[in-house]
């Protein structure tokens, strides 16, 4: 199982970052470089159709166009399971035929690994990207120059947080709406450090819906592990609207049993600049 996990790591990094070194596996799994290289070599023996190209100058392996995941599903959520912060592993090599566990999966989005590789490279090297993007607000495909800094999964879809030169502000761009692979431009001037909403942390305070009976409020508080009838959740200001949506507190249900939790009134008002408009 441990070697399976390492092979899954190999496939995921190769697919979504487009390059892999023995040093990356060495650092992630706290193993020797020799062991890491042996794992890479053995993978190539076991799956020769997934041939790698080796760049001697960078000492990294890159996938060929024929590369196809053998031990993973090719989902971007699998990349999140290794590199996302505060997330539960999305797979562990467990049999898919288990009759004791059922997970609801959101609809798959049209996300190209080559696009993700370019975005990750731009984030790592602080590069700008020239993109073609389908905009819902304008109803048309638009060219943009963006400076990306972070990939974000909001529970339903993936987007990239980036500075948009057209709008002169930081915005979120849904990955499935990119129309083609972006082109690299010279170094970005606007990075994560200048993104005020990203670097601002807020606290979302949840309480049971006051329309519920006292007993039902206690049940809700128990469900959410509230302390003194309150649950405080830290969140980046840039991501508040997505968290409110995921908690289903961005709208008010006409039945308290359907609502169950609400944002404390004072907190709700303080979140006004960051809620979905």
Image: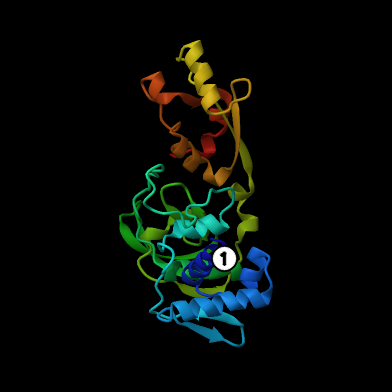
Residue furthest to the left in view is 139
Q: Position of residue 180 (x, y in %)?
A: 37, 70
Quadrant for residue 234, please give it. top right
Q: Position of residue 253 (x, y in %)?
A: 38, 25
Q: Is residue 16 visible?
A: yes
Asked whether, in this view, residue 201 is left or right of residue 91, the answer is right
Quadrant for residue 102, please give it. top left
Give whichever of 147, 93 is nearer the camera.
93
Q: How many marks?
A: 1
Which residue appears at 60% of the width and 62% of the height? 190
For numbered disc 1, what is the local secondary structure?
helix
Give whichever of 228, 190 is nearer the camera.
228
Q: Is residue 167 visible?
A: no
Q: Which residue is mark 1?
A: 123
Asked whether, in this view, residue 139 is left or right of residue 172, the answer is left
Give whichever of 128, 224 is nearer the camera.
224
Q: Position of residue 207 (x, y in %)?
A: 54, 23
Compared with residue 82, is residue 105 higher up or lower down, i.e. above or below? above
Compared with residue 271, is residue 96 higher up or lower down, i.e. above or below? below
């Amino acid at each position: 199982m441990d070697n399976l996990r390492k092979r899954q790591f190999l496939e995921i990094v190769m697919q979504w970052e487009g390059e892999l070194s023995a040093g990356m596996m060495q650092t992630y799994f706290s193993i020797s470089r020799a062991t890491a290289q042996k794992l890479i070599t053995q993978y190539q023996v076991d799956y020769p159709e997934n041939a790698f190209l080796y760049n001697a100058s960078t000492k990294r392996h890159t996938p060929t166009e024929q590369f196809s995941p053998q031990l993973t599903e090719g989902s971007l959520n699998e990349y999140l399971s290794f590199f996302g912060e505060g997330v539960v592993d999305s797979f562990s090599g467990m049999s898919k035929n288990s009759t004791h566990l059922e997970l609801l999966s959101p609809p798959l989005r049209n996300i190209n690994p080559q696009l993700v590789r370019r975005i990750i490279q731009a984030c790592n090297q602080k590069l700008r990207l020239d993109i073609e993007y389908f905009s819902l607000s304008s109803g048309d495909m638009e060219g943009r120059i963006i400076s990306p800094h972070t990939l974000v999964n909001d529970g339903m879809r993936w987007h990239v947080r980036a500075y948009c030169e057209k709008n002169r502000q930081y915005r979120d761009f849904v990955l499935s709406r990119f129309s083609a692979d972006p082109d690299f431009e010279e170094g970005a001037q606007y990075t994560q450090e200048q993104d005020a909403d990203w670097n601002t942390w807020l606290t979302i305070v949840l309480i049971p819906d006051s329309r519920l009976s006292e007993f039902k409020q206690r049940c809700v508080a128990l469900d959410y592990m509230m302390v003194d009838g309150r649950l405080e959740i830290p969140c980046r200001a840039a991501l508040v609207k997505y968290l409110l949506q995921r908690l289903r507190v961005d709208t008010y249900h006409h039945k308290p049993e359907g609502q169950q939790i609400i944002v404390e009134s004072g907190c709700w008002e303080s979140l006004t600049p960051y809620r979905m408009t």
